[in-house]
Image (cartoon, rainbow, N blue to C red):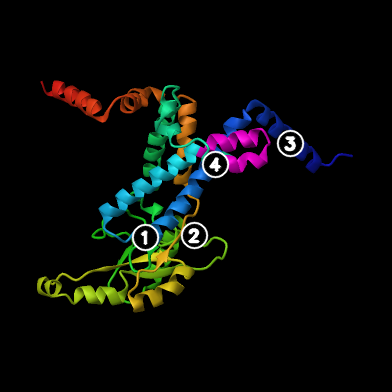
Amino acid sequence: MVSIFELQGGLILRVITEFMSILNFEEVVHPVVLTGLFWSSSTLMQRATGIVNMHAGRAYPVTVCWGIACTGLSMMLAQYNTDGVVRALVNANIPILSSAISNKGWSHFWGKSRSSGNGVNDAKVWLVGMAGYSLLERRGFRTALPSSLLTVGAYAPNPLLHIFTRGVATINPIATSAQRYMMQRLGAVHGCHHCGTRQILNRKSFIADHMPPTKIALQINSRWYRRWLSWPLKQQLLPQCQSCFSQQGSAVRASIHTIVYGMPLRIWHFAPALAYFALEKNLLCDYIDDMVNSAVRTSVAETVAKHTTIILKWFH
């Protein structure tokens, strides 16, 4: 006699089989590979950024521009290599995966393949992917950079300048029970403001991290113009994981920017795959075809002149 579990398992297997027969395997694998390569490229780019001592605690305009450059380059690298990896997986030829990486060269995106339309399509995916990344991340591309334990981390809830509150404002050196409860809620949503981890597996509580650290805040408040203007620097509390907390004490005592790396897979890493899917299904082509085609196939000067002429006609 067949059990109910066997009937359910057979039904689920049949549904999956029918679903996979309808879908094109390459269409399913392509967004997955694109997401994986983009996340891997972003991780490597973040490591390279930390080597030159660039972190999210630098001046806001600098970190935004650096984050845009790193994210854009990571997305380009992912696009270069996706087709070769997908072909290797579809053909079940695993040994050629190593040769699939970077086998197209830089001309694939901006070079000779423009005439065949591939460069224009890649530019569309890149532009839509960058726009989607910005909307999903909402931190000014700063999560592409590592964090310093002496400054507000890249995963702080609000990407605005430091004069705006990103966490919970405080004037006390010790967090209250209500503030610690708020840190658990913020940490569950945004993760540690330095490395981004949500501590789901270890089930540990988040630390209420004073930003800037109390020692640095006292040094800043001792400056003559802040004392003369009665303009003290206010601290704020942000969620911090146990790992970053254990390293922060020595960094503050030595006043050294200790770099912390963190690239957990988040929803904004799916932006290139979502852009590819939207353009593959012609969901956005009508809105961006004219803009992208003119930007890729004409010079920048011609494009600027064209749009300037259109704007001037509006005023006349």
Q: Of the residues tagged 3 and 1, which is closer to the observer? A: 1
Secondary structure category for the residue under label 1: loop
| Residue 29 visible somewhere in the drawing | no
Disc 2 from disc 4: Cα separation: 32 Å
Q: Residues within 10 Å of mark 3 (few under 14, many from 20)?
A: few
Residue 119 drawn above or below residue 89: above
* Residue visible at 43% across and 40% down in the picture: 76
Residue projecting furthest to the bottom: 253
Q: Which residue is mark 3?
A: 13
Specify the amino acid type for callout 2.
Arg
Question: Which quadrant of the figure has residue 311?
Answer: top left
Residue ID for mark 4: 101
What kind of residue is marked 1?
Answer: Val
Q: Rounded to the nearest whole Å, what is the CA distance between mark 3 and mark 1?
A: 51 Å
Left or right: residue 60 compared with residue 272: left
Instruction: Name the foreground residue: 177 vs 166.
Output: 166
Q: Which residues are magenta?
A: 81-99
Label placed on residue 52: 1
Q: Point out the tag, 2 or 1, that comes first from the N-terminus.
A: 1
Image position of 174 with respect to 94: above or below: below
Please tell me which residue is depicted at 54% across the width and 41% down the height of the picture: 101
Amino acid type, mark 3: Leu
Structural crowding at the residue carrying mark 1, measured as other residues with C-alpha within 10 Å and reported as few (<14), some (14–19) or many (≥20): few
